[in-house]
Image: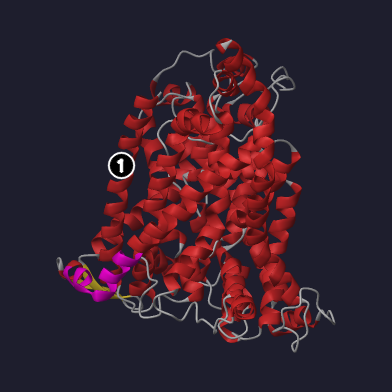
């Protein structure tokens, strides 16, 4: 589940505070004054291993250990294995076979399916950025003009899809988009006499339908990030500008925009890096990458290499390439936005 | 004269100017809300329609029926899958919470050798998507005989740097003086965590737990690899198996979908503000 997130380097740049928040508990009622069992930490002179332990020098490691062990077993060790497998041939049911050098990489890069999945990932990004970054930005500005319970109401409603499971969402949309009996075609036919459209079966349309469903799912999240950033803009600035005769557009352009640029960059980068992943569930439920591989993303093709073709080597080679691109992308993005944020503040 | 204009005119005109456009803003937001809510409402409506009515555009079913729900209960082990999902979500939530609390506490209270590198190892997991490591993880799972099991579903999910990332922000702000006071009182490291730190960070911990629960309830990718049978399936996988088996039974499918999202929707309605806040803070989609 943590595959869908990215970190920013400094917490204060993360546009992460809702208008009304107060998640810290109070300090008043802490039971610090209760007597506890004395461990005599201060009493003995420290010496040797025992003292090292006593002084508490090892204590932090004990607290970190359970998590660390799990990370090594289920994240870092398999990550290394993925690199290793990418240089080997092998079948998912039989295991790794033999060392083949760069053969898997050459094979994967030359596969039309893989090339197609890169193009598709690009299309997902191109489709998602306007729909899930630009439009939510506009809507957030509108929403910030409305105060009180209505704002809360719209916010709650528009956020609902974010908590919905991708599979549930996909099954429901599949019904809405059903070519014969789906409500969308029925309404289009009723209103405009349009013939039934095979939304998910048409190789020109399917990818945009996945974009639409993904937009439906993530729109509210991005909207809320923008809204939080806008509400965070100091009201005094706006009042002062208004008194100076600034129009609403002036205020948006010269006050709101510059202050929400970090959020904007964050979301654009986030979308570029993760678009291929967001669509995974929807693609697997709705199209399995079809029709004619027009809806695969790089993450989906890697899954297919492994679990449809059982090809360990090629799946791992694809995984390594994606990982390197993703890692480099994240690294550059973090550096770039860091500098950007400094210029602006 | 001019000063008068710039000072007074806008202040007087302002409310009128926004008010003028207010209805348009509401119109846009209402249309958007309808777009967001419609699929969910349509799923619920469909789920109460009789088979011969499913293909109509009626918003209110002529002869409302619960047959579709009955069908789901008899056709697939839905209750079983619901319980599986609940067990899965609860175990992962509590497990990740425990592990992350310990580590976040370790990182935020003490300075120690290798701290930065160790912390980087935790944070680093955030840029290793689950798909990257599926092949070795799947092979390991098969070797351990954990396919189709709760252990196979949950234990790999506990390896998460996200909790440490999320909780450390809250733990770091914990006043050092209170630690000192605890030492003077003779409280050990664990006792300090349990009876001083945790009670004071209850809000953050609750928010994190709700977030984890929703994410795990909705988790699809890992269960997809681990379970292949209805009886071991969580809802997300079961729903897809059901779709593959009965692709055109839209009434039962919508009934199953409705029952799958209902628990999370209820949770959301009860704790909207905390949930929105937790999601936005965490950057989780």
Whether residue A119 appears in magenta in the rendering, the answer is yes
Which residue is at a point 62% across and 37% down the rendered structure image?
A144
Front-lying residue, B240 or A89: B240
Residue B39 shows in this picture: yes
Whether residue A281 appears in magenta in the rendering, the answer is no
User: Which residue lies most toward the bottom here?
Assistant: B52
Is B223 placed above or below B279 here? below
Quarter of image, res B232:
bottom right
Q: Position of residue B6 (x, y in %)?
A: 57, 17
Residue matched to label 1 = A331
Which residue is at a point 57% across and 27% down the rendered structure image?
B189
Q: Position of residue B15 (x, y in %)?
A: 68, 30
In the picture, measured across the screen, residue B137 lies left or right of residue A180, that is left
Is A152 placed above or below A162 here? above
User: Which residue lies most toward the right here?
Assistant: B63
User: Which residue lies most toward the front here?
Assistant: B1
Is B138 placed above or below B76 here? above
Q: Residues within 10 Å of mark 1 (few under 14, many from 20)?
A: few
Magenta: main secondary structure equals helix
Which residue is at a point 67% across and 65% down the rendered structure image?
B38
- What is the secondary structure assignment of the residue under circle 1? helix
The image quadrant where one finds the N terminus of chain B is top right
Which residue is at a point 32% across and 68% down the rendered structure image?
A117
In the picture, measured across the screen, residue A68 lies left or right of residue B217, that is left
Per the rendered image, the range of residues in magenta is A106-120
Front-lying residue, A191 or B276: A191
Q: Position of residue B265 (x, y in %)?
A: 71, 57
In the picture, measured across the screen, residue A4 lies left or right of residue B196, that is left
């Amino acid at each position: 589940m943590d595959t869908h997130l990215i970190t920013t380097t400094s917490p204060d740049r993360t546009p992460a505070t809702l208008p009304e928040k107060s998640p810290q508990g109070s300090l008043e009622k802490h039971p610090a004054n209760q007597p506890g069992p004395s461990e005599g930490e201060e009493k003995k002179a420290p010496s040797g291993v025992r003292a090292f332990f006593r002084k508490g020098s090892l204590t932090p490691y004990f607290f970190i250990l359970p998590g660390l062990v799990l990370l090594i077993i289920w994240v870092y060790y398999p990550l290394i294995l993925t690199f290793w497998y990418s240089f080997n041939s092998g079948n998912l049911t039989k295991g790794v076979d033999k060392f083949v050098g760069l053969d898997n990489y050459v094979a994967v890069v030359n596969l039309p399916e893989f090339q197609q999945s890169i193009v598709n990932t690009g299309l997902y990004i191109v489709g998602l950025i306007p729909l899930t970054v630009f439009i939510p930005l506009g809507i957030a500005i509108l929403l910030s003009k409305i105060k009180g319970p209505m704002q809360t109401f719209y916010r709650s409603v528009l956020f609902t899809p974010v908590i919905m499971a991708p599979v549930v969402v996909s099954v429901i949309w599949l019904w809405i988009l059903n070519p014969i009996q789906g409500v969308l075609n029925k309404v289009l036919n009723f209103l405009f006499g349009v013939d039934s459209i095979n939304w998910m079966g048409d190789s020109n349309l399917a990818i945009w339908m996945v974009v639409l469903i993904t937009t439906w799912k993530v729109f509210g999240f991005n909207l809320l990030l923008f809204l939080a950033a806008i509400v965070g803009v100091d009201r005094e600035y706006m009042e002062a500008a208004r008194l100076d005769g600034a129009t609403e557009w002036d205020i948006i352009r010269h006050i709101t925009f510059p202050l929400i640029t970090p959020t904007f960059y964050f979301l654009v980068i986030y979308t570029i890096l993760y678009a291929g992943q967001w669509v995974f569930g929807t693609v697997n439920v709705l199209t399995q990458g079809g029709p004619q591989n027009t809806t695969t993303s790089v993450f989906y093709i890697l899954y297919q290499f492994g679990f449809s073709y059982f090809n360990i080597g090629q799946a791992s080679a694809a995984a390594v390439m994606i990982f390197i691109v993703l890692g480099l992308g994240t690294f550059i993005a973090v550096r770039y936005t860091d500098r950007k944020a400094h210029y602006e503040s | 004269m001019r000063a008068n204009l710039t000072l007074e005119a806008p202040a007087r005109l302002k409310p009128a100017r926004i008010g003028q456009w207010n209805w348009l803003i509401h119109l846009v937001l209402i249309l958007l809300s309808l777009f967001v809510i419609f699929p969910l409402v349509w799923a619920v409506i469909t789920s109460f329609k009789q088979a011969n009515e499913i293909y109509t555009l009626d918003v209110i079913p002529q002869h409302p029926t619960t047959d579709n729900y009955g069908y789901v209960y008899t056709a697939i082990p839905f209750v079983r899958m619901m319980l599986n999902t609940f067990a899965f979500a609860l175990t992962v939530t509590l497990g990740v919470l425990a592990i992350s609390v310990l580590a976040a506490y370790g990182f935020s209270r003490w300075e120690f050798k290798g701290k930065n590198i160790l912390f980087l190892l935790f944070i680093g997991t955030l840029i290793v998507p689950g798909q990257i490591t599926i092949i070795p993880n799947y092979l390991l799972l098969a070797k351990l005989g954990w396919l189709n099991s709760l252990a196979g579903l949950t234990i790999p999910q506990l390896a998460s740097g996200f909790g440490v990332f999320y909780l450390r922000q809250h733990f770091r702000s914990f006043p050092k003086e209170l630690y000192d006071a605890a030492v003077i009182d003779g409280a050990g490291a664990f006792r300090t965590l349990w009876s001083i730190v945790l009670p004071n960070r209850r809000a953050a911990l609750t928010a994190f737990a709700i977030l984890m629960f929703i994410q795990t309830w909705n988790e699809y990718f890992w269960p997809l690899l681990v379970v292949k049978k209805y009886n071991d399936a969580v809802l997300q996988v079961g729903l897809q198996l059901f779709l593959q088996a009965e692709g055109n039974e839209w009434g039962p499918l919508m009934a199953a979908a409705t029952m799958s999202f209902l628990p999370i929707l209820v949770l959301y309605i009860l704790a909207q503000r905390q949930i929105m806040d937790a999601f936005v803070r965490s950057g989780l989609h």
